[in-house]
Amino acid sequence: MLAPASTGPARAVAEVGARAVARFDGDGELHVRWIFLLLVSRAAGILWADRGGELPDRLALFAAGAAGSILLALSRSLGFDLVPGRRRALALAVVHVVVAILSFDLGHEALSHAFEQAQADAQRVAELDPTAIRLVDARVTVRRATGFGEEVELVDVKGRAQDERVPARLTLAIPEGPSRAERLLWPGARVRVGVAIAPLRPPRNPGSPDREHAAARQGLVARARLVKPDWVVELLPAGEPASQLALALARLRRAISEAVRERLAALDSRQEGAPGAGLVRALALGDRRGLSDETRRSFRQLGLAHLISVSGLHIGFVALPAAWGVARARALRRPRSRPVLGFATPVAAGCLAAGIYAGLTGATVPALRASLLFALFGIARTLRLSIPAATALAGIALALLWADAALLFDAGALFSFTACAALIAGGIWGARSRRGLAVLGDPLRASLAVSVGMLPLVELYGLPRALASPLVNAVAIPWAGLVVLPCALGASGLALLLPDGMGDEALALLLLPAGGLEQAAAWTADRLPTAWIGEDLPGRLAWPWALTIGGLAFVRLRRGDLVAPAAAWLALSWLGIAPWHEPPLAEPLPRVVFFDVGQADAALVQSRDAAWLIDSGPGAADGSGGTTILRALRALGVERLDVLAITHGDLDHRGGALRILSVVNVGELLLPARASGDPALAALAEAARARGVDVRWSAAGERVGGPGPGSFAAEVLWPPAAEVDTTSIWAGRARNDASLVLRLEVGHQRFLFTGDISAEVEDQLLVGGSALRAEVLKVAHHGSRQASSPRFLAAVAPEFVVLSAPCGAGRGLPSPPALARLAASGARLGWTGRNGAIVVSGGSEGAAPLGMRYWGGERRCVPPLRREGVAVWEMR
């Protein structure tokens, strides 16, 4: 309801607003239908554009808009716009339809423009030589952390050469270590950089989202690589206050973060440990670089990963004290000031503090959402307006979506707004406060509401669903919000204000709650059963049933019930929601799928009754890799692996193994015997045994698997069984040369997997008389210069060769000489970076001939390089 303000200008503003609302809607109530109408219609237009849908004739839309405007004008002259009745209802219905159509059109236009820009940039980048060095001027907009370091987005990109056409937007990776790039590339900066520009070509696999399409939503189709880390020059700003403010905030943020890090590191050295320092930096400053692998793992398994992102709790703990402090100071100085205007100054102070803090912590969507909500509710309080929580949330969502149409597909934005919507739907946000023992159920009710509400997003993004999440969050969120976060903010403030060596006792005391939370999370994750700690188990419940159960859970939550929502959550999280079904592979079983995992290896050998995975793709050292492979296994219907074979200990071959062992039922882990002293493989073997998986260290001459309906067997050709000095086998090139070499017979066709062996190992296989003949060869070491010798290719005599490497040869792989040798062999080349995931099937008795098909369309990977008379990029 709308209530007039007390006195003065604020009252006049409120009364004008009340009259406007009453004139338009017929009463003094602030209806929400216009906000939701605009939000839903704009989102629908964006979705329609994303699916490639076209709009009807624009003249029809403009005619509908003009007709609605004329009808509204005539209604005023006829005198029925303020008179309740059918005519007024009809007029408002027409206006609603017109507004919805125009909002749909504008949403469609916003995203279509990004796609048009992306298409134009794609044509430009296709004409460029990806190896040429270019000088470009650009403005930095975003700097973010990735799994492999940091990267920035460059906009308004212009080539320095005359008439040079370059993409208007680029992504640029920042090299690790101190450099001019690390120091100068901050949001808001205008820079001149020396780069090589290549198309943006993410991997393409079954079960994975179309990342190329996702990048095109933001107008991104190209990436840049710095020629040298110091080839960056900062240009003088041309009178752009917004850019200068963004640059100042970004540099201030890094300076604060580094100062806090150095202060806590000094405390760690003096006191022999400062537990919780990394979590304090993550909570207070949004800097996650100091988090340990154990903390990341345990928070992820328990469903607590949201705690380490800046959200509404953080904004509240900064904005509310600032507003309260200004209000108290004003009350002491002017105790008889007018209440409305007196409240405006504290609100402005809180909004300013919230905005600065959001900017210093990276201006993420959750932080922006919380800051805007604080400002909106503060203004409403100043004007004595009552705004429903749903209206406020929808209005903020509409404003952000109007500013950036691509936010409709942003994971952070979706999770943030879905969590708030779940709290509103469950009756937790906006409900009257409760007293007595009943208030103890509120954290659990809130946790259940958020867990149930976000489960569809969790399933869509392939994240783990933790059975224990509501209970753990019901305890962790109050502790983190009321104790850990204030202490983290206080510790960061002390670390900045006090000189080194002063106040160490107070600083250590403020770190204790964060350290306790880390230890409690690790202890809980290690002791809960696997099914309770958020492992990536496949979903089985159909979406209509899941949505029905979730809806009933929210109905019971609004009535104060906890038992029925808890039972609904247990059912939903235990069964999971079945993934959207993609078109099945047309290739019959048995088949071999070589996944597109960049400069890494992963291949699935699949029959009706058996499945092997040879290598597990890339991943970080903390064992968090494997998401792409898990999604692909689900999409291909694989729930059990008879054998997981890791050819050697490099992360690009074992990066996803730990997670796969945790999620998928694996019968046997196959490892190279000559690498038994490799610490990485030894740790993997220990983790497999702890999960009840048989571990086998295999050497040349052994046979794995056996005869049986629908099964297949493998000969181990390398490494030899002879013992070697285990102190050096995992270092440098020796680690690659200890790779497993397997020859599998699949449906009467032979597949040779060669790991990362070099030409010397290939020669030893030839000298040793190994049976190398195979119809399909997985090329060794991603097509390096030291592999796939002509003699070896002649001995194998493959019909098809498969190269697992990215498109563009950013790290020199595949090498042009290796590509030329493969072309000279006469075999048909399948290149994951060029073709996406590769499926080889057929050749069995009564089946189609052996064939190779691709998951994605063909890309032009390299410029026409001619070695030994072969046009490399034209190879098939």
Image (cartoon, rainbow, N blue to C red):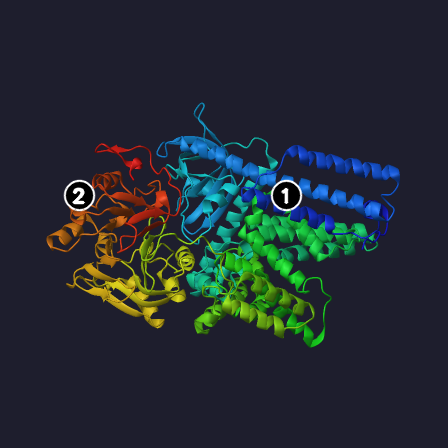
Which residue occupies the foreground of this view, 257 or 173? 173
Rendered position, 803 above or below 193:
below
Q: Report the residue at 68% width, 40% height from top.
A: 102
Label 2 crowd (10 A; few <14 / some 14-19 / many >=20)? some
Depth check: 282 or 768 in front?
768
* Residue position marked by numbered label 2 in the rendering: 790
Count of residue discs: 2
What secondary structure is marked by label 1? helix
| Mark 2 to mark 1 CA distance (whole Å) | 59 Å
765 relative to 484 in the view: left or right = left
Give 337 or 754, whichever is nearer the viewer: 754
Judged from this view, the residue extending furthest toward the bottom is 437
Q: What residue type is labelled 2?
A: Pro
10 Å neighbourhood of mark 1: few (<14), some, or many (≥20)?
A: some
Residue 579 visible? The answer is yes
Q: Which residue lies furthest to the top in this view?
A: 162
For badge 1, the amino acid type reads Trp
Q: In this view, does 232 lie above or below 720?
A: above
Q: Position of residue 337 (x, y in %)?
A: 82, 52
| Residue 561 shown left or right of residue 267 in the figure | right
Determine which residue is flagged by label 1: 402
Label at residue 777: none
The mark closer to the camera, 2 or 1, is 2
Q: Position of residue 685 (x, y in %)?
A: 30, 67
Which residue: 29% across, 47% down? 803
The x, y position of residue 761, in whole percent, is 17, 52
Residues 224 and 336: in front is 224
Residue drawn at 36 percent across, 54 percent down: 618
